Image (cartoon, grey):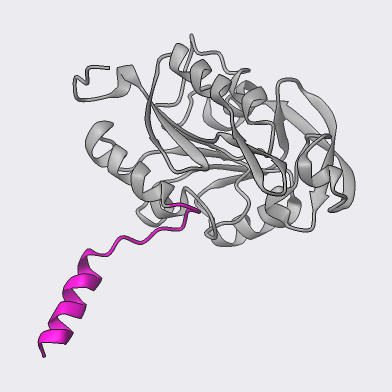
């Protein structure tokens, strides 16, 4: 009986995560305690899958809604099936409006617009397709009345910095950003994009945490507590 009680106690207090490295649990803590919003909205660029390795599904399950964006139509079809409250858009995001070649990979999560991507160079491409790309400002204008959602997640396989640097930080901005900040250069070598980290810090963001793959930033003016940097 004691073991069963322990099991129930552990089950009650366990933390469920759908992210790759627990990013959604960290983000949930932030929106409960540091930037208190009961049901934060989100924009997930490079959303990949409605719940597998996904940073926003935990919020969706709690009643939040947002915008999911991916250049892979198969991914968006899954979102349209399983995330009906969300706006799900099949398009690429870049710093201009137009078209770019999209390199489909054997592992769809690695598909990218970056031509010199490590996986492209190692011939894991299954298909190259011309895909429409739009700016993040146009995306926000079209689907959220020019207001940035509370949370921005980006996993754009090499286009992360391009997208972030196209944001007008003098206008509407996300309160929290979760972005992939490492890049693969060889089979066993990954490098940190310190320039991207510095760029966001320069534009008013505090680096809250790092999971080894993604870095989570909080806009300083959105913090409810007076944190000394």
Residue drawn at (49%, 12%), measured in percent from left and top?
Answer: 171
* Rendered location of residue 81, percent (x, y): 60, 61
Q: Is residue 163 magenta?
A: no
Q: Determine if residue 3 is in view.
A: yes
Residue drawn at (15%, 78%), measured in percent from left and top?
Answer: 6
Measured along the vertical axis of the image, is residue 27 above or below residue 141? below
Q: Is residue 2 magenta?
A: yes
Residue drawn at (29%, 36%), measured in percent from left and top?
Answer: 37
Residue ranking furthest to the front: 188
Q: 212 or 137, which is in the foreground?
A: 212
66 lies left or right of 111: left
Residue ranking furthest to the top: 170
109 lies left or right of 182: right
* Rendered location of residue 129, percent (x, y): 88, 44
Residue drawn at (21%, 71%), measured in percent from left and top?
Answer: 10
* Rendered location of residue 24, percent (x, y): 41, 48
Q: 15 or 186, which is in the foreground?
A: 186
* Rendered location of residue 56, percent (x, y): 46, 48
Q: Quadrant of residue 131?
A: top right
206 lies left or right of 45: left
36 lies left or right of 176: left
Q: Which quadrant of the rendered structure holds the N terminus? A: bottom left
Q: Which residues, given as a range, are shown in magenta? A: 1-21
């Amino acid at each position: 009986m004691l073991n069963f009680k322990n099991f129930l106690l552990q089950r009650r207090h366990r933390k469920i995560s759908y992210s790759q490295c627990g990013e959604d649990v960290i983000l949930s803590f932030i929106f409960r305690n540091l930037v208190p919003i009961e049901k934060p909205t989100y924009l997930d660029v490079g959303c990949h899958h409605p719940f597998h390795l996904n940073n926003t599904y935990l919020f969706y399950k709690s009643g939040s809604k947002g915008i999911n964006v991916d250049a892979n139509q198969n991914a968006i079809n899954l979102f349209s099936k399983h995330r009906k409250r969300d706006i799900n858009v099949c398009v690429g995001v870049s710093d201009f409006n137009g078209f770019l070649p999209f390199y489909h990979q054997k592992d769809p999560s690695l598909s990218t617009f970056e031509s010199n991507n490590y996986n492209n160079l190692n011939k894991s491409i299954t298909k190259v397709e011309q895909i429409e790309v739009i700016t993040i400002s146009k995306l926000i204008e079209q689907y959220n009345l020019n207001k940035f959602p509370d949370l921005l997640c980006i996993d754009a396989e090499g286009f992360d910095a391009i997208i972030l640097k196209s944001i007008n930080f003098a206008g509407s901005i996300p309160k929290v950003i979760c972005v992939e900040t490492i890049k693969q250069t060889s089979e066993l070598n990954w490098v940190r994009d310190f320039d991207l980290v510095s760029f966001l810090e320069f534009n008013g963001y505090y680096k809250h945490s790092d999971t080894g793959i993604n870095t989570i930033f909080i806009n300083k003016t959105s913090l409810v507590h007076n944190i000394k940097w």
